[in-house]
Image (cartoon, rainbow, N blue to C red):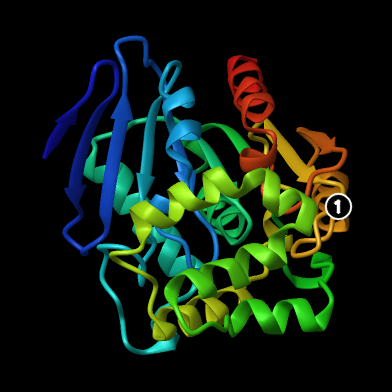
Amino acid sequence: MNNSTESVTIEERKTDNGIFCRRTYTCTSKDHLVLVMGYGGSLRIWPATFVNQLAKTFTVITYDNRGTGLSIVPLNPEEYTVKVMADDLFDVISTFGIASHHLLGYSMGGCMALQYAHDHQDYVESLFLMSSTAGGALFAKPDKAVSTALANPEGKTLWDIYMSTFGLMYSPEALQRCMPTIEAIYQVSKECPTRPIALAGHSNAFRGFDGTGYLANLKIPTTILSGKADRLMPVQNSLNLAENLSNSTLVLLDDCEHGPHIQNESEVVELIVRCAKH
């Protein structure tokens, strides 16, 4: 499927394994950049403005994690592991016939990106771990009430449930500033919300992930990015990653929480472009 606008072209496909994926590019797009969404998120959770800005430089690949969007929804939580979801990502890469690419993982998506980079190091030109963790002994846990609320979003309407989640990500002041983007995300994702069984599966995947053993041998140039005020993925997780990844650069953003690409969109785009060129 091809959808073209004045400057952005979108191609959509499905892998043989049932993973829905999208390629977004412009006439100036060059290297591939793959974006990996986190817990419970489909590709629609990436702000269109963020993807389109990146597409001025990169051919951007996004996809629906298993259990989300238009991808397969396994009904057994045990069928969701970070390893399996990283294999889904490799299927996406293979479907588009991509030989090498830059890779960005956000939140739990960073765990998948780390697993993928370990399994397919030769494919990855540069790695970005945004608001993420290596898991295992290096996982700095958020407040228990926050993690419990994230796994069990509440609300009478879908909008209420979305706001329950975004309310955990942002302070009231930051939430208000981000509201136009949040409303846009809701509009494009409301027709295919993530089902409870998939949330249970993603929780199972995250709990079972331990990437600490991958860090010493990972030589890919890596940029670690975090908001200093992140409540969902405390900044200590990024500090731990930086301490254990020898070829890494740590970038911490003031007054930023669990969504640098939303709160500091232009700054994050510029950072990705700059670091991917080095």
Q: Which residue is mark 1?
A: 229
Q: Nearer the viewer, residue 5 or 15?
A: 5
Residue 5 in the image: above or below residue 50? above
Can residue 131 be spotted in the picture?
no
Identify the image quadrant of residue 235: bottom right
Q: Quadrant of the N terminus?
A: top left
Q: Nearer the viewer, residue 171 or 20?
A: 171
Give how far across and how far down residue 56 sits, in percent: 43, 16
Identify the image quadrant of residue 94: top left
Disc 1, SS: loop
Residue 276 in the image: above or below residue 24? above
* Residue type beneath disc 1: Ala
Residue 29 in the image: above or below residue 202? above
Residue 133 in the image: above or below residue 23? below
Q: Nearer the viewer, residue 271 or 135?
A: 271
Q: Residue at x 29, y 16 (%)?
A: 7
Q: How many marks?
A: 1
Give how far across and how far down residue 264 sits, in percent: 69, 34
Give how far across and how far down residue 3 sits, in percent: 17, 32
Q: Nearer the viewer, residue 150 or 155?
A: 155
